[in-house]
Image (cartoon, rainbow, N blue to C red):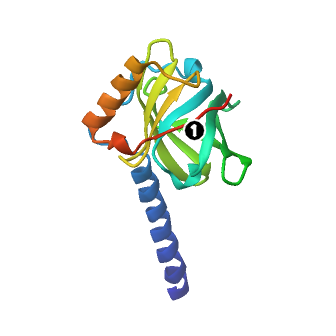
Amino acid sequence: MKTIHKIILPVSLGALGLILFNSYSVRIPRGAVAVKNFDAKKYLGRWYEIARFNYRFEKNMDNVTAEYSENPDGTIQVRNKGYNYLKKIWDEAIGEAQFVKDKTEARLKVSFFKPIWAGYNVIDIDEDYQYALVAGSSLKYMWILSRRTNIPESIRQRFLEKARKIGYNTKELIWVKHDR
């Protein structure tokens, strides 16, 4: 009986820890609100990363794109690609996104290393789905995306103002270069 307790307790605590970690990692920053009446099909396709913070997993990268496509099971395939200008190589990561709640609310969780998930929250998007402001789970993660390699100044200012109101330090954003 003691052997069973020695196994069950650590396994139970580990499972509880994983559940708590996953719940915490897919949050939305305080003050941010995910887009309602979101149309996932209109969001699919290629997006160019216009701005981001300096993340370890995108360090020294330009020409960064994200390609979203629907998987047969209804989840979304995420294909991130960028050029590491120091190593002079292209790098690519393929992951999966799932809706946290309803498919009409732009709150998703994304994983490139299951079972670890991160929040992906579209908090602003234009009506034609050409420009998007995406918040991660905390104020450490944010992206400005566009269907083209640039963004109109009016959209840029709209997104920056919204991000500042939520608490993002927009002065630390990296503005991504695109050669093509």
Task: Please state if 108 lies on the left or on the right of 59 as rendered.
Answer: left
The 10 Å Cα crowd at callout 1, few under 14, some 14 to 19, many 20 or more, is: many
Camera-side residue of 165 and 104: 165
- Furthest residue toward top: 128
Give the vertical position of 92 relative to 63 (above or below): below
Q: Amino acid at mark 1?
A: Ala
Give the vertical position of 113 relative to 47 (above or below): below
Q: Which quadrant would residue 21 be assigned to in this image?
A: bottom left
Give the vertical position of 81 relative to 38 (above or below): below
Counting every numbered tag in the picture gives 1
Position in image of residue 88 (x %, y %): 73, 49
- Furthest residue toward right: 89
Tell me the residue at 57%/52% (across/down). Answer: 59
Tell me the residue at 52%/85% (across/down). Answer: 1
Q: Which quadrant would residue 82 be assigned to in this image?
A: top right
Position in image of residue 154 (x %, y %): 38, 18
Position in image of residue 121 (x %, y %): 43, 35
- Furthest residue toward bottom: 2
Task: Please state if 46 lies on the left or on the right of 23 as rendered.
Answer: right
Position in image of residue 141 (x %, y %): 43, 45
Residue 76 visible in rendering: no
Camera-side residue of 49 and 19: 49
Tell me the residue at 58%/29% (across/down). Answer: 48
Q: Which quadrant would residue 92 be assigned to in this image?
A: top right
Camera-side residue of 141 and 96: 141
Mark 1 highlights which residue?
97
Instruction: Check the picture and name the quadrant holding the C terminus.
Output: top right
Residue 131 visible in rendering: yes
